[in-house]
Amino acid sequence: AEVRLPFWSRAPSCWSSGFNVPPSAQFVARPVGVCSMMKLPMQASAAGLDVAFVGVPLDTGTSNRPGARFGPRQIRAESAMLRRYNSSTGAAPFDSLRVADIGDVNSYQDIVASGCVPLTLGKDRTNVATVSGAGTVPWDWCTWMLTPTPETGLWGRKIYHGSTFRRCVDEGLLDCGRVVQIGIRGSSYEPNPYKYCREQGFRVVPAEECWMKSLEPLMREVRAQLGDKPMYISFDIDGAGPRLRPGHRHPGDSRAHTCAGEGGSAAIPTFLFFPCCAPFKGGCSTSTALEIIRGCKGLNIVGCDLVEVAPMYDVSGNTALLGANLLFEMLCVLPGVKTM
Amino acid sequence: AEVRLPFWSRAPSCWSSGFNVPPSAQFVARPVGVCSMMKLPMQASAAGLDVAFVGVPLDTGTSNRPGARFGPRQIRAESAMLRRYNSSTGAAPFDSLRVADIGDVNSYQDIVASGCVPLTLGKDRTNVATVSGAGTVPWDWCTWMLTPTPETGLWGRKIYHGSTFRRCVDEGLLDCGRVVQIGIRGSSYEPNPYKYCREQGFRVVPAEECWMKSLEPLMREVRAQLGDKPMYISFDIDGAGPRLRPGHRHPGDSRAHTCAGEGGSAAIPTFLFFPCCAPFKGGCSTSTALEIIRGCKGLNIVGCDLVEVAPMYDVSGNTALLGANLLFEMLCVLPGVKTM
Amino acid sequence: AEVRLPFWSRAPSCWSSGFNVPPSAQFVARPVGVCSMMKLPMQASAAGLDVAFVGVPLDTGTSNRPGARFGPRQIRAESAMLRRYNSSTGAAPFDSLRVADIGDVNSYQDIVASGCVPLTLGKDRTNVATVSGAGTVPWDWCTWMLTPTPETGLWGRKIYHGSTFRRCVDEGLLDCGRVVQIGIRGSSYEPNPYKYCREQGFRVVPAEECWMKSLEPLMREVRAQLGDKPMYISFDIDGAGPRLRPGHRHPGDSRAHTCAGEGGSAAIPTFLFFPCCAPFKGGCSTSTALEIIRGCKGLNIVGCDLVEVAPMYDVSGNTALLGANLLFEMLCVLPGVKTM
Amino acid sequence: AEVRLPFWSRAPSCWSSGFNVPPSAQFVARPVGVCSMMKLPMQASAAGLDVAFVGVPLDTGTSNRPGARFGPRQIRAESAMLRRYNSSTGAAPFDSLRVADIGDVNSYQDIVASGCVPLTLGKDRTNVATVSGAGTVPWDWCTWMLTPTPETGLWGRKIYHGSTFRRCVDEGLLDCGRVVQIGIRGSSYEPNPYKYCREQGFRVVPAEECWMKSLEPLMREVRAQLGDKPMYISFDIDGAGPRLRPGHRHPGDSRAHTCAGEGGSAAIPTFLFFPCCAPFKGGCSTSTALEIIRGCKGLNIVGCDLVEVAPMYDVSGNTALLGANLLFEMLCVLPGVKTM
Amino acid sequence: AEVRLPFWSRAPSCWSSGFNVPPSAQFVARPVGVCSMMKLPMQASAAGLDVAFVGVPLDTGTSNRPGARFGPRQIRAESAMLRRYNSSTGAAPFDSLRVADIGDVNSYQDIVASGCVPLTLGKDRTNVATVSGAGTVPWDWCTWMLTPTPETGLWGRKIYHGSTFRRCVDEGLLDCGRVVQIGIRGSSYEPNPYKYCREQGFRVVPAEECWMKSLEPLMREVRAQLGDKPMYISFDIDGAGPRLRPGHRHPGDSRAHTCAGEGGSAAIPTFLFFPCCAPFKGGCSTSTALEIIRGCKGLNIVGCDLVEVAPMYDVSGNTALLGANLLFEMLCVLPGVKTM
Amino acid sequence: AEVRLPFWSRAPSCWSSGFNVPPSAQFVARPVGVCSMMKLPMQASAAGLDVAFVGVPLDTGTSNRPGARFGPRQIRAESAMLRRYNSSTGAAPFDSLRVADIGDVNSYQDIVASGCVPLTLGKDRTNVATVSGAGTVPWDWCTWMLTPTPETGLWGRKIYHGSTFRRCVDEGLLDCGRVVQIGIRGSSYEPNPYKYCREQGFRVVPAEECWMKSLEPLMREVRAQLGDKPMYISFDIDGAGPRLRPGHRHPGDSRAHTCAGEGGSAAIPTFLFFPCCAPFKGGCSTSTALEIIRGCKGLNIVGCDLVEVAPMYDVSGNTALLGANLLFEMLCVLPGVKTM
C-alpha cells in the first residue's frame, strides 16, 4: 500500500535501504512532481510507519483571516527544498525512522493506534486535542465544532477556535503541571489573561521574555520540568495574522502555549506548544523558534503540529517555506533520531 | 501500479466503475490532499491509459520572464475545482476514456508508445516537437537545448526557445499544408514575419482576425483543412508575458501556431497551436480560446499541450485556473469522448 | 439615529436637501474618512430609508477559497470613487431615493419590514433566500447552516453553500416560471446539470449565449417574462474563483442564476441572479454585466445582492472596485429612480 | 551627445544605418541593461530626432491612488520585449524615423522647438496641455499646480488633476470642433456631464458605444473630421483605478477625451485623447484600444502621451507592458512611418 | 454627537460603563462593520474625550513612494484585532480614559483646544509640528506646503517632507535639550548629518546602538532627561520605504527623531520621535519598538503619531497591523492609564 | 566615453569635481530617469574607474526558483534612494574613488584588467570565480555552464549552480586557509556537510553562531586571519528562497561562504562570502549583515558581489532595496575610502 511517486523510479537503489529518503536533486529536480511532503512516498494509512506527515486543510474556526485550509498544500510545495540531514544539529531522521506522507487526515485515531508519531501540517488549531491511545482524538471534535458567524456568535458554545486548551483542561486531558506556553503576546479581553493558565499549573513565558536572547537556558528548564513522560509540540506560525484570543469566559486558552498534560488516570500525552515566529508583531524570531524546537531533543515527543499557515497572505511563499523547515526540525528531535 | 491517493478510499464504489473520475466534493473537499491533476489517480507510466496528464516543469528556454517550471504544480493545485462533465458541451470524458496523472515527464517516447494521448501541462515550448511513433519525441531535444545567457548568446545555435517549429520544418516533421496558426500578434524582427510560414504552407490567422467575433466559421474551415489525419494542439496561455519571438534568421516560428504536420513518409501527427488568451495584450479572449478548442471536436487529436503558465506573475492563481480549465476542454474534444 | 460621518460637516448645505448624497471630492478627498458605502451617512436601522446598503461579512459556506467575509469592507473602501449621477444612463438615484449604509447585517427581517430595498454587499451566497414580508429571511438560515469541513462532509445536510436555490424551490419560495439564470458555465457533476432547473420552469442562459454580443435583446425578453411582479437581483462577481457547484443530489442550484419567484400563496418576491463577470474564466465581460443590470430598469426590484468579492485574491482592489460600481448600477435601476 | 548604452557595442553595424533600432535579442538578452525605452539610445535633448520618448514621473495631481510617478520607470522596463516591426500593420517606424529616449522631462518647450514629436509616458494628466510652437507647454503649468490635500481642498483653484482640458478651452488652446473623446464612462457629479463638452463642439463617444464591436467605422469618421491639421493623442490606461472626474464647476474635463484643438490664431495642434482599456471597469478592451490608435494612421499627429500607469497596483507588470505596446503602436502611426 | 456604529447595539451594557471599549468578538465578529479605529465609537469632534484617534490621509510630501494617504484606512481595518487590555504590561487604557475615533483631521487646533491627546495615524510627516495651546498646529502648515515635483524642485522652498523638525527649530517650537532621536540610519548628503542636531542639543541615538540588545537602559536615561514636562511621540514605521533625508541645507531633519521641545517662552510640548522598525533595512526590530514605546510610561505625553504606513507596498497587511498595535501601545503609556 | 544621464545636466558643477556623485534629490527627484546604479553616470567600459558597478542578469543555474536575472534591474531601480555619505560609519566613497555603472557584463576580464574593483549585482552564483589578473574570470565559465533540466540532470557535469567553490578548489584558485564562510544553514545531503570545506582549511561559521549577538568579535578574528592579501566578498541575499546546496559528491560548496583564496603560484585574490540575511529562514538579521560588511573595513578587497535578488518573489521591492544598500556598504569599505 505504499505509494511512491512516479519520479521515485529514477532514484538509485542506494537511496532506499528500508527507509524513505527525500530524493536528491540529483535525481529529481526541485519543481518536478506531484507535491508530497518532502517528496516522500505516500501511504494510505500510517501502518508500518514510525512517523507520518498528515495534513489538516481546515480553517473553519478562524475568526479573522481565513485561508489555513490551503496551508498543507503550500507547505508540501515548499518542502521540495528539504534534504536528508540537518546540517546544524547532525540529525539524520531518515536514517533512523520510517517516514511517509499519509495525505490529509482521514482518521486521527487510526494514526495514533498504529503507534506512529503524527507531524501535522497547516490547519488552524480548532481541533488540536489529545494524541493518545486513551484520549479523544482531535477530529472527533469536528462534529461538534461551531463556526463564528456574525449572527450566531461564537460564545455560548463550548467549542470554538480559541477554546481548544480550555476544553482540554475541562476534560482532564492535560497534565497541567507539565504544560509550558512560550511566547504569549497581544492584547486581551482580560486584565490578567494568564491567571487561569497559571492557576492550572501551566508555565507561561510571555514573548517579552524571549526577546534578544538565547532560549537555551529556558529549554533546559523545560526539559527538566517535562521529564520523560509523553509530550506534544504545537507550533503556531501565525502566518494568517493574530488569531482570536480567548474571551473573558474562556481565559484558559491563548495564542501560543507550551502545555504538558497527563490528565486523569489514562496515559494522556504531554503537550508542548510554541509561539508564532513572524517577526513583525512582537513575537519571537526564527532563530528563537529553532532554539525551542531543537531544545526539545531528548523529550518523549508523541506528536507535533504546525498551525496557521495561510498562503494567500504571503505571496512570496516564505511562510510556508518556514513551516516546512520547522516541521523538518520537529522531525529531527523525535525520539530515536540518530545524530551523525 | 496505479496509485490512488489516500482520499480515494473515501469515494463510494459507484464512482469507479472501470474509469477514473475526479472525486466529488461530496467525498473530498476542495483543499484536501496531495494535488494530482483533477485529483485523478496517479500512475508511474501511461500503460493502460487512453489519456495521460503529464507535466513538464521546464523553463530553461525562456528568454524573458522565467517561472513556467512551476506551471504544472500550480495547474494541478487549481484543477481541484474541475468536475466530471462539461456542462456547456455535454462532453463526458471520464465516462469514455481512462485518464490518469502520470506525474512529470520521464520519457515521452514511452507515453507515445503506449498508445496514450498525452495532455501536457505548464512547460515552456522549448521542447515541443513531434508526438508520434515515428517522430522524434520532444524531450530528446533537451539534450541539445541551449540556454539564452547574455554571454553565450542564443544565436548561432540551432535550438532555442523560439525555434521549435522552424526546426520541425527543417526536420520534415510537419505536414505543412495542414498547419494552422491562430492568434499571431506582437512586434517582430522581420517586416513580414509570416512570409516564411506561409511559404511552407501554414495558414496564419493573426490576432486581429479573432477580435470581437465568433470563431466558429474559422474552425469549420480548419476542420475541413485538417481532415481526419492526426493533429496536435499546442496552446500558449502566455501567463508569463510575451515570449521571445524568432529573430530574422528564424522566421518560421512565432508565438502562437496552429500547425498540422505530416512530414516525410512516416505517420507524423498534425500540429494545431492556439494563441494566448490573456486579454490585456491584444490577444484573444477566453471565450475565443474556448471556441477554438471546442471547434476541434471531430478532429483526430493525438496530443495536446498548454504552455507558459508562470504562477509567480499571477498571485491570484487565475492563470493556472484558466490553464486547468483549458486542459479539461482539450480532454473533452478528444476522439472517443461521448456526449451526454 | 442617522449618523453622518465627521467629514460630512464640511459638505455645504446644498448637498443635503432631504436626500443623502455621496459627498463631492470638492469637500472630502477620496482617501479621507471611515469608509461607509459611497461615504453615505450610516444608520443603525433601515427606518426611514428607501434603500439600505447592508454588508454580510460571511464566507463560512465557501468550499474552496475563503475570504468573502472581507468583501463588504473592501467594497466600502473602493466605493470612495463613486459620484452622484450615472453618466451613462442619466440615472439620479440620490435625487430620488433616501439611501444610507446601515452597517453589517443585524436582522434582515427588520430591513424588509421597514419597506426598504436592501442592497447587500460582499457575502457568499450561503444565505441568500427570500426577501419578503411573508418569506423567510436569509439570515435565519444562519442558525442551521453547516460548514463543509473535510470530515463532516457537506452532504447529508440540507443546507450548504451551493444549495441555496434548491432549498428555495423546496420551500416554495420561488415563482419558478419567472426565474432567469444568466451566464451559467463550468464543469458539473451531472451530465445535464440544467435539467432540474428547467424542469422547475427556470430560464437558463449559459455563458456561451452571452459571448461577443449585446444582451439587450435578451433583457427585453426577460422584462417581458418577469412583468411587474416583485423580483430580486443576485449577482455573483466570483472574485474568489469558481465556487462549489451543486452535487448530483442537488442539481437545482448553480453558480449564477436569474430567478423570479412568487412561491406559494404569499407575496414572495421574485429573484433575478446574474453571472460572474471576471473575464478570464469564460464568464461574461464587464460590459455584459452592465447590460444585464441596466436591462432590469423598469422591473419591480425589491432587493439586490452582490456576492463573492474576496479581496485577498486581487491585490489591485479592482474586483472590489467593480463590485462597488455594480452595486451603484443596481441602485440606478431601482423603481422610482429618476433619469435626468 | 547621443548616448548608446554599453550593450550597444555588441550590436552589429547593420543595425544602425543612420537610424536607431531596438537591439535584437540576438545581441542583447531581454533582462540585460539599464532600461531605456525599447533599449534605444538616450540623448540629453531632442536635437536631431524625429521622435523622442520622454517620461514625466509625476502624480501630484492624483486625487485617489498615487503611484503614476513610477510609470515611466516600469514602462521602460517592460518595453524590453518590443521589436523592430509591427507584425500586424507592417509599420516600420525604425526604418523611417530617428527615435531615441531623451529621459525624463527637462523642458517640454525645447522638445517642441526641436521639431520632434514627443511620445510621453506614464504621468498623470495634470499637466497635459498644448504641444505647439505657439501654445503653452504643459510643464510650465507645474509651477502653479496645486495638490489636492484634504485641508486645502482642490476647488477654488483653477488647476488640478481633472481640469486640464477645461483650462485648455479657457485659454483658447483647442480647436474644439475637432476634439473627439472616446470611451467616456463612470459616475459623475453632474446629471449631464457631457453637456459642457458638447457645447464646445467636442464629439463625445461614451464607452457604451465601443462595446462588442469594431471601431473602424468610428475611426473613419474621426479621420474625416480631423482632416490634415495637427492633432495630439492622449491615452488614459487608467492602471491606477478611476481618476477624479470633473466637478460640477468644471464639467469641461472628463476621464477620457479625444480632443482636436486649434485655438486662437496660432497653429495650436489638435488633441485626440483615448479612453482607458482596463477591461474590468466597463471601459474598452485592448483590441478596441488598438483599433483606435491604428485608426489614427494618416492623421497629422504632433504628439502623443500615455497616462496613468501606476505599477504598484499591478504586480504582474502587465499594465506597464500594455503601456509599452500602446506607445509602440502610437509610434507606428506617426506621419512618415513607412509600411513594409 | 457621539456616534456608535450599528453593531454597538449588540454589545451588552456592561461594556459601556462610561468608557468606550473595543467590542469583544463575542458580540462583533472581526470582519463585521464599518472600520473605525479599534471599532470604537466615532465622534465629530474631540469634545469630551481624553484621547482621540485621528487620521491624516496625506502623502503629498513624499519624495519617493507615495501611498501613505491610505494608511489611516488600512490601520483602521487591521485594528479590528485589538482588545481591551495589554496582556504584556497590564495597561487598561479603556478603563482609564475616554477614547474615540474622530475621523480624519478637520482641525488639529480644535483637538488640542479640547484638552484631548491626539493619537494620529498614517500620514507622512510633512506636517508634524507642535501640539500645544501655544504652538502652531501641524495642519496650518498645509497651506504653505510645497510638493517635490521634478520641475519645480523641492529646494529653495522652506517647507517640504524632510524639513519638519528643522522648521520647528527655526520657529523655536522645540525644547532642544529634551529632543531625543532614536534609530537614525541610512545614507546621507552630509558627511556628518547629525552635527546640526547635536549642535541644537538633540540626543541622537543611531540605529547601530539599538541592535541586538534591550533598550530599557536607554529609556531610563530618556525618562530622566525628559522629566515631567510635556513630550510628544512621533513614530516612523517606514512601510513606504526609506524617506527623503535632509539635504545639506537642511541638516536638522532626519528620518527618525526623538525630540523633546519646549521652545520660547510658551508651554510648547516636548517631542519624542521613534525610528522605523521594518527589520530588513538595518532599522530596529519590533521588539525594540515596543521597548521604546513602553519605556515612555511615566512621561508626560501630550500627543503621538505613527507615520509612513503605505498599504499598497505590503499586500499582507502586516505593516498596517503592526501600526495598529503600536498605536495601541502608545495609548497604553498615556498619563492616567491604570495598570491592572 | 563616459555617459551622463540627461538629468545630470541639472546638477550644479559643485557635485562633479572629478568624482561621480549620486545626484542630490535637490536636483533629481527620486522617480526621475533611466535607472543606473545610484543614478551614477554610465560608461561602456571600466577604463579610468576605481570601482565599477556591473550587473549579471543571469539565473540559468538556479535549480528551484528562477528570477535573479531581473535582480540587477530592480536593484538599480531601488538604488535611487542612496546618497553620498554613510551616516553610520562616516565613509565618503564618492569623495575617494571614481565610481560608475558600466551596465551589464560584457567581459569581466576587461574589468579586472582595467585595475578597477567590480561590485557585481544580482546574478545567481553559478559563475562566481576568481577576480584577478592571473585567475580565470567568472564569465568565461558561462561557456561551459550546464542547466539543471529535469531530464539531463545536473550531476555528472562538473559545473552547476552549487559547485562554484568546489570547482575553485579543484582549479587551485583559492587560498583555502583564508576562506571564511559565515552563516551556513539548512538541510543537507551529507551528514557532515562541512567536512570537505574544513578539510580544505576553510573556516566555517554556521548560522547558529551568528544569532542574537554582535559579530564584531568574529570580524576581528577574520581580519587577523585574512591579513592584507587580496580578498573578495560574495554576499547571498537569498531573496529567491533557499538555493541548491551541494550534493554528496560536491560537498565543497555551500550556500554561504566566506572564502579567502590564494591558490597556486599566482596572485589569486582572496574570497570572502557572506550569508543571506532574510530573517525568516534562520539566517542572519540585517544588522548582522551590516556588521559583517563593515567588519571588512581594512581588508584588501578586490571585488564584491551580491547574489540572489529575484524581484518577483518580493513585490514590495524591499529585498532589492536591501541589496542596493548592502552594495553601498561594500563600496564604503573598499580600500582607499576616506572617512569624514
Image: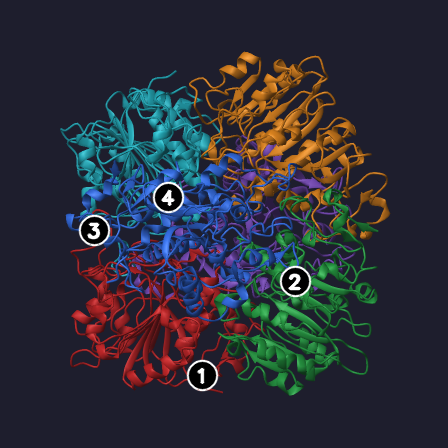
Chain colours: A blue, B cyan, C orange, D purple, E green, F red
Residue at mark 2 shares a chain with residue at mark 1: no
Q: Specify the amino acid type for callout 3.
A: Gly
Q: Chain of mark 4?
A: A
Q: Position of residue C50 (x, y in %)?
A: 78, 32
**Crowd tier of the residue under label 4, counting other residues whose Cα lies within 10 Å: few below 14, some 14–19, many 20 or above:** many
Q: Chain of mark 3?
A: F
Marks 3 and 2 sit apart, C-alpha to C-alpha, by: 54 Å
Instruction: Point out the residue furthest to the front here.
Output: A265
Q: Specify the amino acid type for callout 2.
A: Leu
Q: Determine which residue is flagged by label 2.
A: E327
**Crowd tier of the residue under label 2, counting other residues whose Cα lies within 10 Å: few below 14, some 14–19, many 20 or above:** many
- Nearest to viewer (mark 3 / mark 4): 4
Q: Is residue F155 above or below residue B192?
A: below
* Callout 3 touching callout 4 (CB < 8 Å): no
Q: In front: A219, or D152?
A: A219
Number of numbered discs overlaid on the protein picture: 4
Instruction: Point out the residue furthest to the left here.
Output: B265
Query: In percent of the image, x 74 and y 28: which residue is there?
Result: C112
- Nearest to viewer (mark 4 / mark 1): 4
- Nearest to viewer (mark 3 / mark 1): 3
Q: Position of residue E22 (x, y in %)?
A: 70, 52
Marks 2 and 1 sit apart, C-alpha to C-alpha, by: 49 Å
- Residue D118 visible? The answer is no
* Callout 3 touching callout 2 (CB < 8 Å): no
Query: Which of the numbered marks, if any, corresponds to residue A54?
Result: 4
- Nearest to viewer (mark 4 / mark 2): 4
Q: Determine which residue is flagged by label 3.
A: F153
Q: Specify the amino acid type for callout 4.
A: Val
Q: Chain of mark 2?
A: E
Query: Which of the numbered marks, if any, corresponds to residue F18?
Result: 1
